[in-house]
């Protein structure tokens, strides 16, 4: 798993790690059952304190996305194909979304522009949870609606 951090950001490092894991799950790059590096290994890879990674993993566990076990490490326990969200998630998410949209409006981002940004972000993730487990499809990629079709390079000349 590749995690890119912005050390100059005002966003705490543990939050950046948490956000990258959530984005990888949403994109289909991490799926239910996917192992994550140990807290110590990821800390070494990123050059940060392992307590910072531990805080991020604990947050993900609390959110119901990871299972932490001393022997087996951190494992993703939920992805878009896992079914409906847990109790209370939608209400909490809607409250956070409301605040984010209020911030955008307060900063002068207009309604249609806000919708455009929301669409852009949403389409950057997997379009349909029902397609998340198609065999032969690369994680995070659109399904191929023409199976076994290979381009004929002679036709393009």
Image (cartoon, helix red, strand yellow):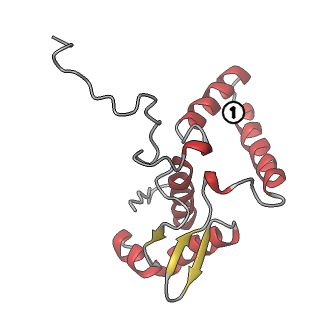
Q: Position of residue 30 (x, y in %)?
A: 49, 58
Residue 147 sits above or below residue 62 on the image: above
95 or 81, which lies in front? Answer: 81
Q: Position of residue 113 (x, y in %)?
A: 65, 23
Residue 119 sits above or below residue 55 on the image: above
The residue positioned 60% from the left and 75% from the top of the image is 67
Q: Position of residue 37 (x, y in %)?
A: 42, 73
Crowd rating for badge 1 (residues with CA inside 10 Å; few <14, some 14–19, many 20+): few
The residue positioned 64% from the left and 72% from the top of the image is 61
142 or 13, which lies in front? Answer: 142
Q: Secondary structure at mark 1?
A: loop
Q: Quadrant of residue 5?
A: bottom left
119 or 32, which lies in front? Answer: 32
Residue 68 sits above or below residue 143 on the image: below
Query: Where is mark 1, residue-wise?
Result: 107
Q: Quadrant of residue 137?
A: top left
The image quadrant where one finds the N terminus is bottom left
Q: Is residue 99 left or right of residue 121?
A: right
Q: Position of residue 98 (x, y in %)?
A: 79, 42
Q: Is residue 44 left or right of residue 99?
A: left
């Amino acid at each position: 798993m590749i995690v890119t951090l912005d050390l100059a950001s005002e966003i705490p490092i543990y939050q950046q790690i948490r956000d990258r894991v959530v984005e990888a799950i949403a994109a289909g790059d991490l799926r239910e059952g996917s192992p994550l590096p140990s807290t110590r290994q990821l800390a070494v890879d990123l050059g940060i304190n392992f307590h910072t990674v531990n805080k991020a993993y604990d947050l993900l566990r609390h959110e119901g996305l990871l299972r932490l076990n001393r022997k087996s490490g951190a494992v993703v326990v939920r992805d878009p194909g896992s079914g409906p969200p847990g109790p209370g998630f939608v209400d909490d998410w809607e409250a956070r979304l409301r605040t984010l949209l209020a911030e955008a409006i307060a900063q002068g981002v207009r309604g249609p522009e806000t919708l455009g940004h929301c669409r852009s972000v949403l389409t950057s993730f997997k379009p349909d949870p029902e397609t998340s487990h198609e065999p032969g499809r690369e994680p995070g990629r659109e399904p191929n609606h023409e199976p076994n079709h290979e381009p004929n390079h002679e036709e393009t000349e």
